[in-house]
Structures are given as structure tokens and as C-alpha cells.
């Protein structure tokens, strides 16, 4: 593994496994914080950030792109997985890919 934290594992191929910390899951249940906030805080531990706008993945799912500043890779997260997997306390795997020209444009806009 490349980098390991309590709630995030980054593998040699760039893939990430993440889960929500227990203390945040309790706050989620009580409605103190939102799942997107918790995801953003969790990803921040590895210098990963949401970039661009949300978009349709399918007829029933929305998603967003995540950029890993450390590894220069991007991931797509399905918003359904946030509630169904992460909020339930399970691990979620995000699959890495090298940014293409369109991704680079979004990354450069985000950095500006």
C-alpha cells in the first residue's frame, strides 16, 4: 500500500478504500452534519478534493469527480454509495484513472 490512514487506504495502483470515521457516523445519524461534509473531511486527509460539477452517471444516479493532488489521479463517486455504503460504516472502493484532456481542463480551472 502507498498510504494508509485509519479510514483511508491508498493502494499502489492509486485506488482508494474509504470509510466514514465512527464519530462522524454518529453525527450523521443525528443530522448534525451531512454525508457530503463527512466525505469531504475524510478525503481531505489524503489531499483529495471534489472538482467540477456533479453529473449524471445513469438514469438513477448522480456523481462527482474527485482529484487526488498527491497522486495526480481522478476518481468518480456515485452519490448513492455515500448513503448506502459509507453512512452504513462499510468500506467503499474508488477506482483511479489518469486524467484525460477534459479532466485536466477541470483540474486547471479548480486550481485557478
Image: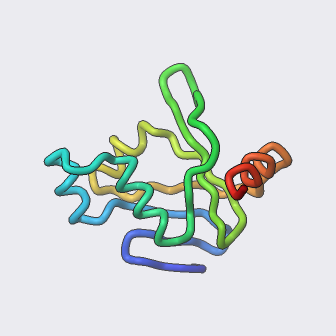
60, above or below 34, in the image: above
- Quarter in which the C terminus is drawn: bottom right
Horizontal arrangement in the rendering, residue 74 relative to residue 78 (left or right): right
Where is residue 102, by image quadrant? top right
Q: Position of residue 11 (x, y in %)?
A: 59, 72
Residue pictured at 72% horizontal, 53% vertical: 107
Residue pictured at 51% horizontal, 31% vertical: 62
Pick whichever, 109 or 91, lies toward us.
Answer: 109
12, above or below 31, in the image: below
Q: Position of residue 65 (x, y in %)?
A: 61, 46
Horizontal arrangement in the rendering, residue 13 relative to residue 11 (left or right): right
Horizontal arrangement in the rendering, residue 41 relative to residue 69 (left or right): left
- Quarter in which the N terminus is drawn: bottom right
Q: Position of residue 68 (x, y in %)?
A: 63, 63
Q: Residue furthest right?
A: 101
Q: Residue furthest top?
A: 59
Residue pictured at 73% horizontal, 46% vertical: 106
Q: Residue furthest front?
A: 112
Where is residue 15, by image quadrant? bottom right
Horizontal arrangement in the rendering, residue 31 relative to residue 61 (left or right): left
Q: Position of residue 40 (x, y in %)?
A: 44, 56
Which of the colour schemes (rainbow, by chain, secondary structure, one colour) is used? Answer: rainbow
Q: How many tags in the picture?
A: 0
Residue pictured at 65% horizontal, 67% vertical: 69
Pick whichever, 22 or 103, lies toward us.
Answer: 103
Amino acid at each position: 500500500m502507498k498510504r494508509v490512514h485509519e479510514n483511508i487506504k491508498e493502494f499502489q495502483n492509486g485506488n482508494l478504500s474509504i470509510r466514514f470515521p465512527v464519530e462522524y457516523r454518529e453525527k450523521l445519524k443525528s443530522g448534525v452534519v451531512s454525508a457530503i461534509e463527512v466525505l469531504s473531511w475524510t478525503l481531505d486527509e489524503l489531499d483529495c478534493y471534489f472538482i467540477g460539477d456533479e453529473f449524471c452517471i445513469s438514469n438513477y444516479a448522480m456523481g462527482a469527480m474527485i482529484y487526488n493532488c498527491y497522486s495526480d489521479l481522478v476518481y468518480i463517486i456515485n452519490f448513492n454509495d455515500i448513503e448506502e455504503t459509507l453512512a452504513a460504516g462499510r468500506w467503499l472502493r474508488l477506482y483511479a484513472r489518469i486524467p484525460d484532456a477534459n479532466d485536466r481542463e477541470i483540474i486547471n480551472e479548480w486550481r485557478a
